[in-house]
Image: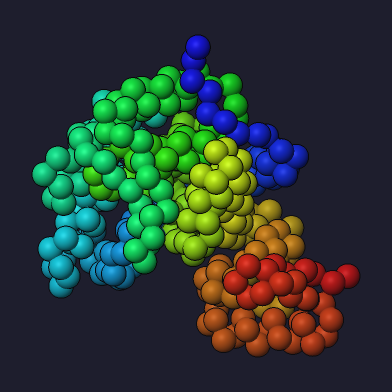
Amino acid sequence: MPYQPPFTITSEILNLVAEISQQVGRLDASALNASPQLRKQNRIKTITGTLAIEGNTLTEEQITAIVDGQRVLGTVRELAEVNGAIAAYDALPNFEPSNIHDLLSAHGLMMAEVLLNAGVFRDKAVGIHKAGVVHHVAPPAHQVSGLMADLSRWLKQAKDHPLIASCVFHYEFEFIHPFSDGNGRMGRLWQTLILSQWHPLFLSLPLESVIKDYQSQYYQALEAADQHADSTPFIHFMLTVIAQTLAQNAPANALANAPVPIAELKTPDAILILVQGNAHLTRQQLADTLKKDVRTIARAMAKLQHAGRLKRIGSDKTGHWEVQV
């Protein structure tokens, strides 16, 4: 009987899939894919985020310098991790998500300068430890090849929406922990690959950077799925992160849909139009979109709030804006 990963499609998950599909539709015609510079910036954010989750301390500026071929001071391992991530993400469009050989090749690129056995499944037992406490014991090494073959066959034949299937694969991959090192960054890389097969937009989105912003919740979702022996909690978390990533990359779309050219509007009016299009915009994103100093944006927003035309719902980090009529 074919392997079927355990998970439940809840109404919350269905709502998130619908919301994300609408967001992708709105972003489809944006400048996100048309701008090489923006694609490069997002790729750098992606690499910075996925490596930072694993403890790499190199900054976005330093990784930008490495991408540009400049010399950067850092430990041998951290520099090797960056080189590997650059190579793996550059090759991503050439891989097939359900192909085990491609998965091994991607790991070989990602960990080439870090592991002697890069691109090979582990041959020893592994577990995840935090502060001396065991949080997860992976299946025995002799089961890895069979488990990964089962998971890849399921992915190839899955009838579930790619948004859901990508989350399920990500969780199952982390549970199996098929490599001696690099499993976290490979799980995130492969989810991006699966999503990009649904829509190429995901090759240009810094999903891993947003996961880094919610790193503790990311690990909590993995642990919750372990405890339930069911990936549903992780699916819900990752879909929320995907929705957040899309929301944070919507300014170009909001500009395109504005009834009056933004440049011809006063700053407060332009802010209201952009926020109506994307309630999750940050002050910095508004400043970048309107080509204004962030302090100018902050003052304009403060005046709008004081006048009762704009309201902040929730915290600065996870909340959103609401335009008051």
User: Residue, x 20% and y 46% (percent of image)?
Assistant: 111
Residue closer to the observer: 43 or 193: 193
Residue 235 shown left or right of residue 210 in the figure: right
* Render colour scheme: rainbow
Q: Residue furthest front?
A: 133
Q: Count every numbered label the image shows and give the total.
A: 0
Is residue 103 in view? no
Residue 303 shown left or right of residue 56 in the figure: right
Q: Position of residue 84 (x, y in %)?
A: 21, 49
Residue closer to the observer: 272 or 152: 152
Q: Position of residue 309 (x, y in %)?
A: 82, 77
Q: Quadrant of residue 44?
A: bottom left
User: Against 81, is 12 above or below?
Assistant: above
Q: Residue furthest right?
A: 325
User: Residue, x 17% and y 41% (percent of image)?
Assistant: 118
User: Residue, x 84% and y 81% (percent of image)?
Assistant: 308
Q: Quadrant of residue 322?
A: bottom right
Q: Quadrant of the C terminus?
A: bottom right
Q: Residue furthest top?
A: 1
User: Residue, x 35% and y 36% (percent of image)?
Assistant: 139
User: Against 68, is 2 above or below?
Assistant: above
Q: Quadrant of residue 263?
A: bottom right
User: Against 130, is 107 above or below?
Assistant: above
Q: Position of residue 116 (x, y in %)?
A: 11, 44
